[in-house]
Image: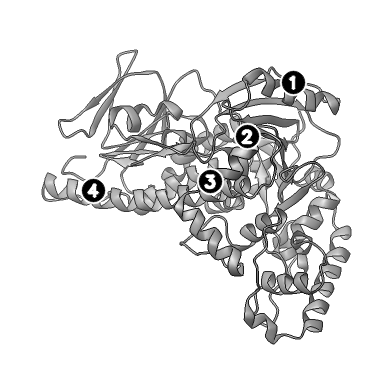
């Protein structure tokens, strides 16, 4: 970046990461005099596993003034109330990770602690059974929580199942309407200044694109951040050994589930993600424990058993789990796969794209400076804080994903025995030690996965604290029991009155091909 104020931002790479980033920047840089250009290859592909989201994605749409119904119609989306985890403790076992609130606090006491006290006195319904999302998922019903005030449904939350390629196209149209310049071309050379900062990109057709700041959305290749800026990759495969995925699509089922399924297998897990016109399916697996053909056979056999019609040839995806040690280096930020990747067990890929773009805006190097040295110093300070914030996000999500594996008591394959015995990151070991004592989650900031998520996964996997909060004993046992029963009954009565998920989609956002 020069001594002058920031004038040009160049994004390398399209797809969901590039165009979502462009959309966020375009929305917030209007009127600043800063231009945003995105250059993408004519050969655009999508990773194929980013077809599920978390609730903050819906908040992004609202933030960008994008009508939910229009977005869902154009991307053939369905609603997602959580994830159904099947066989993670062995055959016939399942649990649900719901979005939104679970239960209601009782006299200022956290609901989980009240539920835990009741479980220790007299076991009753599972923790998830006090979630409106769980009830709606079980009965295949849906209603917008914001349209159900003063009911138990109001405390629910939701995300979306989306078609990744259509998401990229939607955000491309949005960004271009706000002035982003879209170019098509293949980058053949990256030019740098003597300082190591990026100067320009040369395309195969001879064009040279200059900019003050660069955003790398080039995927796993990480052409700018990883290669040109030499930001090293930190591997996390010792904790998350899955490194491959088969992805395919089958015909849409007659009933459209309003949740994702994650089904544990001998060396990984399978996903099932319903869209309006098809069902996304895949198998994430560890190549060190099963070969690619065996993993494909597992996926195809599961579809065949259900009589599901294959719509395309399965595609093999290879990935590395981990992140670049510096997501912002010199005048370059890596967003999406160019910066890091965590397997899609909790559907966090698009969330990390959004976080990367929003944090970049927070620490954006807008101002002009009297000297080049001052500009470089200020950018280094901003980059340091950006890297700290994004690393915390990545590691928080990483630890939560590892939690699913390390709590499993499966020992029926080498893969699961490895997961049960592997040393954990210190950060997760410390969180688990605290949680096992009292059901308290260490708060590390603006976490994606809060208390209810930890409670849902830990309780679902049979990992309960040895004791509840002593303060809960100030409540009469009968008072706790009656409050839990009353709330469970309220949910049981409210949900059957809602429209089915399919009916709601038909009215709200159906895309008829």
Report how far apart the C-alphas of labels 4 and 1 lie in the structure.
49 Å
Q: Earlier in the sequence, mark 3 or mark 4?
A: 3
Disc 4 is placed on an element classified as helix
Instruction: Give the image location of residue 7, x and y in percent.
Output: 27, 40
Closest to the observer: 441 or 188?
A: 441
Asked if the residue at tag 3 contacts the one at tag 1, i.e. Cβ–Cβ closer than 8 Å, the answer is: no
Q: Which mark is residue 380?
A: 4
Q: Which residue is mark 2?
A: 415
User: Which residue corresponds to the image point at 67% horizontal and 20% vertical from the top-left?
Assistant: 314
Which is more foreground, mark 3 or mark 2? 2
Tell me: 358 left or right of 449.
Answer: left
Report how far apart the C-alphas of labels 1 and 3 lie in the structure.
28 Å
Packing grade of label 4 (10 A; few <14, some 14-19, many >=20) is: some
Disc 2 is placed on an element classified as helix
Packing grade of label 3 (10 A; few <14, some 14-19, many >=20) is: some
Which is more foreground, mark 1 or mark 2? 2
Report how far apart the C-alphas of labels 4 and 2 lie in the structure.
42 Å
Q: Which residue is mark 3?
A: 351
Q: Which mark is residue 311?
A: 1
Instruction: Give the image location of residue 91, x and y in percent.
Output: 80, 41
Report how far apart the C-alphas of labels 1 and 2 lie in the structure.
30 Å
Q: Earlier in the sequence, mark 1 or mark 3?
A: 1
Instruction: Give the image location of residue 370, x and y in percent.
Output: 11, 50
Packing grade of label 2 (10 A; few <14, some 14-19, many >=20) is: many
Q: Quadrant of residue 148?
A: bottom right
Instruction: Give the image location of residue 429, x and y in percent.
Output: 51, 55
Disc 1 is placed on an element classified as loop
Asked if the residue at tag 2 contacts the one at tag 4, i.e. Cβ–Cβ closer than 8 Å, the answer is: no
Above or below for 484 versus 263: below
Above or below for 501 versus 431: above
Disc 3 is placed on an element classified as helix
């Amino acid at each position: 970046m020069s001594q002058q104020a920031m004038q040009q931002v160049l994004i390398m790479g399209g797809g969901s990461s590039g165009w979502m980033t462009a959309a966020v920047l375009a929305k917030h840089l209007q009127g600043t005099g800063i231009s945003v250009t995105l250059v993408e290859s004519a050969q655009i592909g999508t990773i194929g596993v980013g077809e599920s989201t978390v609730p903050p994605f819906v908040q992004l749409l609202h933030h960008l003034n994008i009508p939910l119904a229009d977005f869902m119609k154009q991307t053939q989306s369905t609603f997602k109330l959580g994830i159904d985890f099947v066989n993670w403790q062995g055959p016939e076992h399942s649990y649900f990770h719901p979005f939104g609130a679970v239960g209601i606090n009782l006299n200022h006491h956290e609901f989980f602690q009240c539920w835990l006290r009741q479980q220790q006195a007299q076991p009753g319904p599972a923790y998830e059974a006090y979630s409106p999302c769980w009830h709606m998922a079980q009965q295949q019903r849906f209603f917008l929580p914001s349209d159900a005030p003063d009911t138990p449904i109001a405390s629910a939350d939701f995300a979306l199942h989306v078609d990744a390629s259509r998401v990229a196209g939607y955000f491309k149209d949005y960004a271009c309407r706000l002035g982003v310049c879209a170019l098509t071309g293949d980058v053949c050379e990256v030019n740098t200044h003597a300082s190591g900062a990026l100067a320009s990109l040369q395309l195969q057709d001879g064009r040279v694109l200059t900019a003050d700041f660069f955003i790398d959305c080039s995927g796993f290749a990480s052409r700018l951040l990883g290669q040109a800026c030499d930001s090293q990759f930190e591997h996390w495969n010792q904790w998350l050994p899955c490194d491959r995925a088969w992805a395919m699509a089958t015909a849409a089922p007659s009933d459209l589930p309003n949740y994702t399924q994650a089904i544990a297998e001998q060396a990984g897990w399978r996903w099932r993600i319903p869209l309006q016109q098809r069902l996304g399916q895949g198998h994430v697996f560890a190549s060190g424990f099963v070969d690619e053909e065996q993993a494909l056979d597992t996926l195809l056999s599961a579809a065949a058993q259900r009589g599901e019609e294959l719509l395309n040839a399965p595609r093999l995806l290879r990935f590395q789990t981990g992140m670049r040690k510096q997501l912002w280096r010199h005048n370059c930020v890596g967003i999406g796969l160019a910066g890091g990747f965590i397997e899609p067990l909790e559907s966090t890929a698009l969330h990390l794209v959004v976080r990367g773009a929003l944090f970049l805006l927070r620490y954006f190097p807008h101002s002009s400076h009297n000297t080049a040295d001052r500009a470089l110093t200020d950018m280094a300070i901003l980059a340091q804080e950006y890297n700290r914030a994004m690393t915390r996000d990545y590691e928080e999500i990483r630890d939560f994903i590892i939690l699913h594996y390390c709590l499993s008591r499966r020992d029926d394959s080498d893969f699961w025995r490895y997961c049960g015995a592997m040393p954990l990151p210190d950060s997760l070991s410390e969180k688990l030690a605290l949680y096992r004592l009292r059901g308290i989650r260490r708060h590390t900031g603006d976490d994606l996965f809060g208390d209810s998520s930890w409670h849902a996964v830990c309780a679902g996997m049979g990992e309960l604290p040895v004791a509840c909060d002593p303060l809960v004993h100030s409540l009469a046992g009968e008072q706790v029991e009656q409050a839990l029963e009353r709330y469970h009954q309220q949910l049981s009565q409210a949900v059957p009155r809602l429209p089915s998920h399919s009916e709601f989609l038909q009215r709200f956002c159906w895309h008829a091909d």
